[in-house]
Image: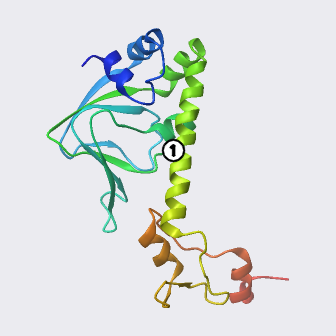
């Protein structure tokens, strides 16, 4: 399948006309990865968008860590990297090739910016896709966590449906893709360790 045909089959670009698709295809690059190759790494600043031409990839949080978790698998026609691509933020997950040969189509941030300048309506389609993903995420969070979370005003533990009380970190980690780190806010530092602060 050629680059233009692949792009036109992807929902992100399916509503664009043939000239817009051809313009984007001309800016795209073919890339190939072998099984277990890391395509993008959590925390990187790379802002490419990837579309899968063939093969399977997996998306991980905390890749290589003992708390590593696989979030999902993606196959032909799926895409990833759109959040960093649209926002220029750091990668929020690691993507690894799962099949023996994975063929991808990549679009660089600057390349697509140039395409958008020539075809401004593409940005509307990209925003619609992003809005759709945000809506799906919101629905997932409401479905997964529920609309009402009973939390202890003292210790901040959360009451489970069976009546037991669970630490807030355990509650959210078991029901979402959230990972926790710990710190201490200035107010608690002053309350717990007043000897280190001058009035």
> Count of labels shown?
1
Q: Toward which corner of the image does residue 25 lie, by quadrant?
A: top left
Q: Position of residue 74 (x, y in %)?
A: 30, 43
Question: In this view of the protein, which residue sits in the foreground, 64 or 117?
Answer: 117
Residue visible at 59% across and 69% down in the picture: 147
Residue visible at 74% across and 83% down in the picture: 190
Around disc 1, counting alpha carbons within 10 Å, would you say few (fewer than 14), some (14 to 19), or many (20 or more)?
Answer: few
* 62 vs 21: above or below: below
Question: In this view of the protein, which residue sits in the foreground, 185 or 94?
Answer: 94
* 15 vs 36: above or below: above
Query: What colouring method underlies this structural image?
Result: rainbow
Residue visible at 50% across and 22% down in the picture: 112
Q: Is residue 199 visible?
A: yes
Is residue 1 left or right of 17 when viewed as pictured? Answer: left
Question: In this view of the protein, which residue sits in the foreground, 66 or 72?
Answer: 72
Name the quarter where the C terminus is drawn: bottom right
Q: SS class of the residue under badge 1?
A: helix
The residue positioned farthest toward the top in the image shown: 19
Name the quarter where the N terminus is drawn: top left
The residue positioned farthest toward the left in the image shown: 100
* 2 vs 144: above or below: above
Residue visible at 46% across and 66% down in the picture: 179
Q: Position of residue 8 (x, y in %)?
A: 38, 21
Q: Toward which corner of the image does residue 62 lie, by quadrant?
A: bottom left
Q: Position of residue 197 (x, y in %)?
A: 76, 82
Q: Position of residue 103 (x, y in %)?
A: 24, 30
* 145 vs 102: above or below: below
- Residue pointed to by mark 1: 133
Q: Is residue 88 visible?
A: no
């Amino acid at each position: 399948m050629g680059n233009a045909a692949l792009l036109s089959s992807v929902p992100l670009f399916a509503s664009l006309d043939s000239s817009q698709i051809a313009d984007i295809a001309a800016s795209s690059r073919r890339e190939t990865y072998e099984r277990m190759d890391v395509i993008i790494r959590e925390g990187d600043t790379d802002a490419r968008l990837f579309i899968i031409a063939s093969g399977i990839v997996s998306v991980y949080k905390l890749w290589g860590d003992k708390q590593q978790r696989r979030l999902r698998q993606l196959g032909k026609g799926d895409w990833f990297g759109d959040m960093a691509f649209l926002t220029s933020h750091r990668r929020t997950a690691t993507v690894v090739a799962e099949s023996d040969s994975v063929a991808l189509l990549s679009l660089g941030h600057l390349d697509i910016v140039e395409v958008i300048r020539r075809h401004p309506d593409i940005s509307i389609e990209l925003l619609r896709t992003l809005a759709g993903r945000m809506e799906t995420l919101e629905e997932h969070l409401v479905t997964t966590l529920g609309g009402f979370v009973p939390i202890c005003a003292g210790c901040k533990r959360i009451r489970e449906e069976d009546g037991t009380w669970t630490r807030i970190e355990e509650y959210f980690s078991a029901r979402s893709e959230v990972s926790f780190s710990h710190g201490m806010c200035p107010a608690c530092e002053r309350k717990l360790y007043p000897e280190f602060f001058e009035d």
